[in-house]
Amino acid sequence: MDIENVIRGLDELFAERKSDQVEDYLSKHLEEALKEGDAGAAITIINELIGFYRDSSQYDKAEAYCEKLLPFMERAGLKDTIHYGTSCLNIANAYRAAGKWKLSLQYYEQVEQIYQKVLEAKDFRWASYRNNLSLLYQEMGRFEDACQALSDALVIVKEYPEAKVELAVTYTNLAVSYTKAGKLQEAEEAIQQGLAIFRDGFTEDYHYSAALSALGDILVAEKEYEKAVEAFQQAMVLLRSHVGLTHAYFRLVCNVQMCYEQLGKPHAMKGLELAQDYYEKYAKQSVNQYIAHRRLGISEGKQGDKELTGSSEQDIPVAIGKVGEGSECFGMDDIFSMDHDFGPGFDLFVTREQYEKDGAKLEEFYANLPDTFRGLQRPVEIPGKPRNGVIVIEDFLGRVLNLSEEEIAYVMEHENLPDSVYLRVEDWQLATVTNGRLFEGTNTVFGRIYKNLKKGYPQEIKRRKLAQALGLICQSGQYNYERMMKRGELGSAVWMLHEMEEQTIQLLYLVNDVYMPHRKWQLIMARQLKEGQDILQEVQAMMAEQPSLDSYRQREPVDWIGSTNTNDPIVERIHRIAESVVQLLKRMGYTTSDAVYLEDQIPYVLQEKKEGTSTMREDTITKEELVDAIVKLEWNAFDKVENEGGRADCQNDWNTFSVMRKSQYLAWPKELLESFYVDFVEANDRNWNLITEKYGRMMESTTPEEYAKIADRFPVCSEQKRAIVDQIAEIQVEWMEAFAKEYPYMAGNARTIRKETDNPWNTSYETYLKGELLTYSDRTLSLYGRWIVSLKQADENLAKQIMTNTALLYGYVSLDAAEEALAKQES
């Protein structure tokens, strides 16, 4: 193998700043050298790999090759040769960088023993050895030893006029050692000599970044923080261009942060501050000039059709800020956030109309902004998911909130979301489009949408979500935790606690009108909430507790039935949290009840009253919108049902599904719809598919043998609940039979009625109904049962009401008209 050619290729990669290709390049050539049996080339390449992994902070990979290199050389008969010594030096450097100083020192000592045998006193390799040894001494705090080693190295390097970079590196290392030894004058003299050499044609050299870093350390020691920031940031840019985001790079970031703190600017490296300062420094004037020249003369909808006449805040037609994905938009970024997708940048939010007219100009303008700011490089954007630059409002909201084109059109017209979307989307999605900060354009389309969404959920929807949270806190914490502990199921009990903790935090976000962010930030950002901090402290204390079964084992399991374990501190803490939740809800005006069993609070929370009166307020969400939301939830669940024979045709027929389900729910009273909506959302939150359960329960009558195989997958239904379902079903079956006599053609398009007709290929109306009723919560089933009784007492037929809705939804003017049309088709 032509190893010199390989090394030239490696040098070219570094010169072209293609460090991301180095590993593959060297690994490929190492494989070739081993196949060819070229031990010398293989040794050279392994040494290069160790050096590369060391400089790029991939220490595990470096150590793996360190362990293989010397045995390989010994098998090649190279032990105690100059090549063996040089490899020991490379290994010592790798272990030093990895923080394994004792092991590193052992290898340095081995190098010295070999060099003393084979090298002359003035050989240049002694300088390299002492330079590297001094770095270990620095790490170990042996600064005087480091200075002495470097002084010895300097004597040797000066004997080689061609070794200019090596001389600069030696001065740099000496400056670092002097600084750490407290000899600032000597450090200043050494670094200036090193920098002078680098600046005489070697500023692109990788080691120049170390010299700039050393200068920064000296300036910090001299309390020249502004100048230190400039030096560190130059070093960051150069270091990243050579070896990427290494530990050395992040140490420079920490140095910059420390300097800014000393300067009274602790947030200067935070994402939102970076974005706004970058915009203010490089873009604001240009944007204002752009607007002043009317290059974005688009009418602003509700503002009227006037043209832009200036560059004031009111006239800016695009919203400029930093909003969207990324921890920096939540103010949660730190040193760990900087290893990917982080850097200076801001957003220009435009409508599709604006983008069609001026998008190309704006993108060109943004692309021409500086690539770096405060030592940080502008992040590379992900195609289709831009986080910086020109962002089309409709695309951004549609992608993050998963909106249909119809819903996007609604948002752009009304500058807010329809209630059906508020009911469907997750909190983190809404948090993502309302986080961050707007720098300009608060009176633009996006500015107004941002402001409206930032207010939080509409009151009635918020109450539904509060009810959902209360139900889950009660179910998981107040009910299921202790029951699972009594069963000895510690893992399941811990799971219940996790759910209670999360739902309690969800409730705190809701009462504070703040959307709960992604799970990893929920707890941290909850500490910033105004209301409910006493509850949060209890939740955090509970998170730190480890449930124990010891007190439960003091009785036989059967003896726990009907009693509470007051010796379990977590049970007591759950009770305190529930009491505090009730007090918070009362203080915030969501309830008047003192009930501590939180499920009992749901009816109160769902009822909002006008201030100062006892009458119920007018609805802000219509019954039809609530029906739409439930049907969409059901459709999404229905889509996920897995059938033995594969996907059913009806799972692709939204129109029929929508008509059938809406026909039923439009007949329901709103209170019942509200309760069932809570059922469905709670089920989704625990990853339970109510539609799968419904169809599974039907199998108890249609295919009993198959049902027996899956019965244990479903929640246990008490005999009392089954009896209630049987009574309700009998009433509804009688109604359906009466309807079938009056409207035989309409009924002919429906299911057979009695369960006696059930078989694997046919599910009766009665069985379908029972399967559905058994999935209802006790709360919903109780409301449903009372409603059915009221209809029967009023001599009304629910089957007829539902089928009337079906006829109307299919476009008939009445039920009779539909019956007549079907009769004509039959004849």
Image: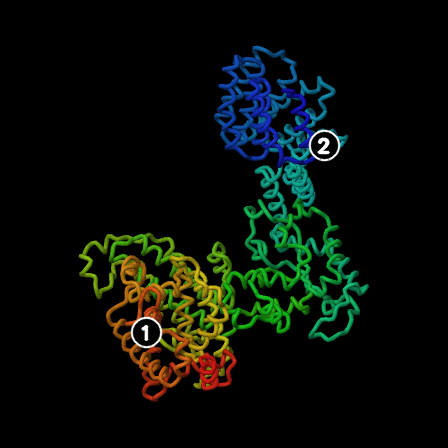
Quick check: marks 2 and 1 in contact, CB under 8 Å? no
The answer to which quarter of the image holds residue 296 is: bottom right
Q: Secondary structure at mark 1?
A: helix
Asked if residue 348 is positioned above or below residue 793 in the image, the reply reads: above
Judge whether residue 687 can be spotted in this image.
yes
Q: Nearer the viewer, residue 668 or 825?
A: 825
Q: Residue at x 61, y 30 (%)?
A: 25
- Residue furthest front in the image: 827
Q: Give the residue number, with chain letter if any, for mark 2.
A: 195
**Residue type pointed to by label 2:** Leu
Q: Nearer the viewer, residue 665 or 64?
A: 665
Q: Position of residue 635 (x, y in %)?
A: 46, 66
Question: Quarter holding the N terminus?
Answer: top right
Asked if residue 805 is positioned above or below residue 512 in the image, the reply reads: below
Q: Secondary structure at mark 2?
A: helix
Circle 1 Cα neighbour tier, 10 Å, few/some/many (<14 / 14–19 / ≥20):
many
The answer to which quarter of the image holds residue 566 is: bottom left
The answer to which quarter of the image holds residue 49 is: top right
Circle 2 Cα neighbour tier, 10 Å, few/some/many (<14 / 14–19 / ≥20):
many
Q: Is residue 722 left or right of residue 675?
A: left
In space, the residues marked 2 and 1 are separated at their CA atoms by: 89 Å
Q: Give the residue number, with chain letter if any, for mark 1.
A: 766
- Residue furthest right in the image: 293
- Residue furthest bottom in the image: 794
**Residue type pointed to by label 1:** Glu
Question: Quarter holding the C terminus?
Answer: bottom left
Judge whether residue 537 can be spotted in this image.
no
Q: Position of residue 43 (x, y in %)?
A: 57, 20
Asked if residue 570 is positioned above or below residue 145 in the image, the reply reads: below
Q: Nearer the viewer, residue 171 or 771?
A: 771
Q: Is residue 521 left or right of residue 170?
A: left
